[in-house]
Image (cartoon, coloured by chain):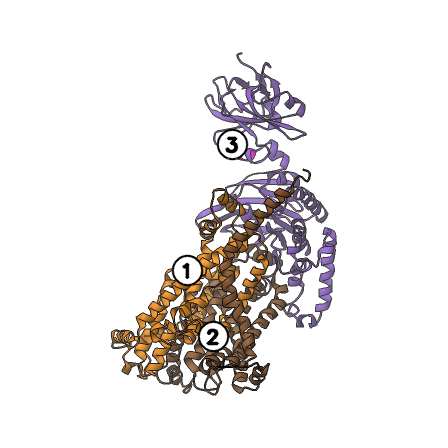
Amino acid sequence: MMAISTFSNQRALQKYNTRDTISAYALVGPSLVLLICLLIGPSLAVFAISVTNWQFGAQSFSFIGLQNFRELFDDRVFLSSLSNTFIYVAVVVPSVLGLGLFVALAIESRKEFQAFYRAVHFLPVMATLAAMAIAWEALLHPTIGLVTRLAVQLGLGSWNFLHDPRLVLATLCVIGVWQHLGYAMVLFLAGLKAIPSDLYQAAEIDGVDHPLDRLRYVTLPMLGPVIMFLLIVITLKALETFDTVAVLTQGGPENASELLLHTLYVESFQFFRTGYGAAMTVVFLLIVIAIIFLQAKVLDKRVHYS
Amino acid sequence: MANVSATDITKIFGGTSVLNSVSLDVRDGEFLTLVGPSGCGKSTLLRIIAGLERQNFGSIAIDGKAVDAVRPKMRNVAMVFQSYALYPYMTAEENIALPLVMRKLTAWQRLPLIGSWMPGARARRAEIAREVQDVANALGLGPLLSRKPSQMSGGQRQRVALGRAMVRHPDVFLMDEPLSNLDAKLRVQMREEITGLHRRLGATFIYVTHDQAEAMTMSDRVAVMKSGDILQLASPQQVYSDPENIEVAKFIGSPQINLIPSIVNEKAELEIFDMKVAGILPASIRPGMSVTIGLRPEALKLALDDSSDGLLAHVTYVESLGSDSYIHAKLVDRTTAVIARATPAEAATIGNGTRVRLRFSPKEALIFSDNGERLRSNNCLPILRKVGG
Amino acid sequence: MIAARAHHGSAALRHVVLIASSLFILMPFVWMVSLSIKSPQEAFQQTISLIPSVFYGHENYQRAFVDVPLLRFMGNGLLICISVLVIQLAIAAPSAYALAKLEFRGRDAIFAMVLVGLLIPHQVLAIPLFILFNKIGILNSYASLILPGVISPFGIFLLRQFFKAVPDDLIHAARLDGLSELSIVWRIMVPSSMSAVIAFSILSVVSRWNDLFLPLIFIQDQQLLTPPAGIMLFRSEEAGNSYGPLMAAATLIVAPLLIAFLIAQRRFIEGLTVSGLK
């Protein structure tokens, strides 16, 4: 085969390629337009709005630089919201992963009632959280609550889980664990199923026969990718906690249950301080991105095998 | 060093028996292969010997001592798995070291971070590292020790799996189809390495494979299994040339043995189509019985059609392998297919449709009864004669 | 013998552990349903009982429908879930196909944008979308709840992963058979990746039905609220004195997805796992 391709068939080929590209863009076009208009564009717009003093409904606004951000870090509500959010994430994420793995191991260890236990633990993942928050409120209610009554009857005194500033964040954490536990459990169950039995047998011959050793030398390392994935997903879900705060506490009492997304909502859509809300949104977004990158960087190298 | 004996091992899975009271004695230092089609129970037997599965009845003894209640860890056996079962998150070095780590270090010494500060831990760790290095050098793994399994080729993973088995100098090596995930060329090379390893270590090897060529080339003795029974336990040569029954004859040898139906006539001769064979029959044969004649491809010699004896056949296909040729042919009933081995020179004179005679020495004919039992003719000298035209 | 007994012990321990955690999980559900069938007097009695002495469910559930337009809320929820899902799939599938199987300039850049979109929590978009919807006059309408959901980077990503696994030869054969690129998407790619489509549909519907954030921001008109925002309204209006009807409403809102889950449990869990581990 010599270089037979003449100028004209080069052109024909090029035309062919162009037609391919056009049809590809016809397929991808709607996504691309919407992606830019509804996702990428608005995300960038948040940055732009965050450096203005815009209040929704106001006739004019002006560029104020980083004023909003400076104000944020003097804002007691925002600062306690920020620290509450970190505490919330730091409690919920390890608890969900730990308990989720524990429940998954317990379910997987024997055949009886596997499907039943799995279904029960998965229910909160499906249930409308706003409605379930109301159910939790009824459960923890000072007069009609099952839990509070039980506490009284067991002589543990009376508790006001949702209105005591020392208890309210912990209560939200418990509900957060309740909500996400099933998700972690289901992914752990899938991860456990995917571990080849050969590996456990080889480990047994190698002398790994204590259950804790088996967990350390085989199960946990093999679950590495699942743990990594859950760490990111549960962290994001915890950061995005909104419904329980909005329904149960509105951030109170004394801002003790103020979480980032709720503060952002109040500033932006109840006080309509749009520029200020946008600055808060930027902080929220930066935290999300930082966490994703941090976890991806730190953990990625250590958990991918194949 | 140890011999291994299995006595009346029965294993039942969900109501069906996968091992039917199997007994097996493996001599000290022997390379014994369990060979058979998939589902014959060979892997289950190996796992029972390892202690990974419990038999329902029967007993396993290693070095004369019953080990039925002994955990796998304490049986002093090592195993190489078909999938290698390497820990994907550990380097080659860590993989090989693990059996030693679990045996030589206490639970305290194995703790992460603080473990290495426990008394004696460092010396033990250094000792383990030395032993791992020795094994790695012996297997040519030295430069690969810091790699993870995903960064290694199939052959290298295979060597790491061997290293993990070797490192604690077990009395018995158990190998479950260790070569079946390798490509053909590497498989032949690894066969050699494993037999070399067996010679060097002098340990007892029990090797499971479905590949009869591996069984034939590597083993001291071969146990041919089918449907939960050991059909024959003998040297590779013996299972090939002197099989106990038709299943063994069929399973061992490639291409497969030729099986030709035959009838015993009133004169106690075998009638194979137009050919009659006398004198090779065992005394137990009765006239009118139908039997099957087994002939290895190399037992059939080509002769031209006008030759005076042999089985008449039509060539359907000539398969040339370079050094040898296999002649595929149909006998006169047009359904019985046979394969004969020929030299390239012989094969050159033949094409599809050529009529040939296939001659054989009755000595080499294996006779099987209808239920597959081998019928031996030890006290008669065979006489071959052609009857009729 | 000893081994068998040890097995027994661990089985019992497993049940103890799992029953305890199941009680924790089920507690709010049980109390919710229990209150929804109790009379107000009984709800405030100090004794602890799950099953009421007088069945008051009829009254409570009836009032749940009368006090707020609960059926309307649920209808709104259904309408929005379905519209969003249909548009999401119609937009995501063709682009997932192009990103998985076609070679064209800019493909990697577009895929990178999808990945970036994957990282953006949708709450971040609330302010700019609020402004945008206000400008084009669709605040406080179904459109304001549908539009933010129509583009799903996750959907594109998930389908692309599955489409990549469809053999190229299948596409080549389809082209030789005269199928257009768009019909390849709907006749070949989507049917052969049904498990991903179902997984995505489940996740989409569940997250849309349960979302409180968007309706709270974009909707003022009570008639347009979705169930989560509706129950919040109900609660603030009733101000805590009629727990029976409130719990009845909560039960009714939670019920559809839970019933769907219990019927098609395997599908739901597989869907979640599939999307999680890809």
Q: Circle 2: is it few (<14), some (14-19), or many (20+) Cα within 10 Å?
A: some
- Queried whether the magenta region covers residue A61, the answer comes back as no
User: Residue C246 versus residue B63: which sits nearer the camera?
Assistant: C246
Which residue lies under the disc numbered 1?
C86
Element class at badge 1: helix
With A160 as the anchor, is B54 left or right in this view?
right
Which structural element holds mark 3?
Answer: loop
The residue that disc 3 covers is: B373
Chain hosting mark 2 = C
Residue holding disc 2: C131
Mark 3 or 2: in front is: 2
Chain shaded orange: C
Q: Main secondary structure of the magenta part?
A: helix
The chain coloured brown in the image: A
Asked which quadrant contains residue C150, the reply is: bottom left
Q: Hey, what amino acid is under mark 1?
A: Val
Query: What distance separates the C-alpha of mark 3 from that of mark 1?
Result: 69 Å
Q: Which residues are magenta?
A: B244-249
Badge 2 amino acid: Ile
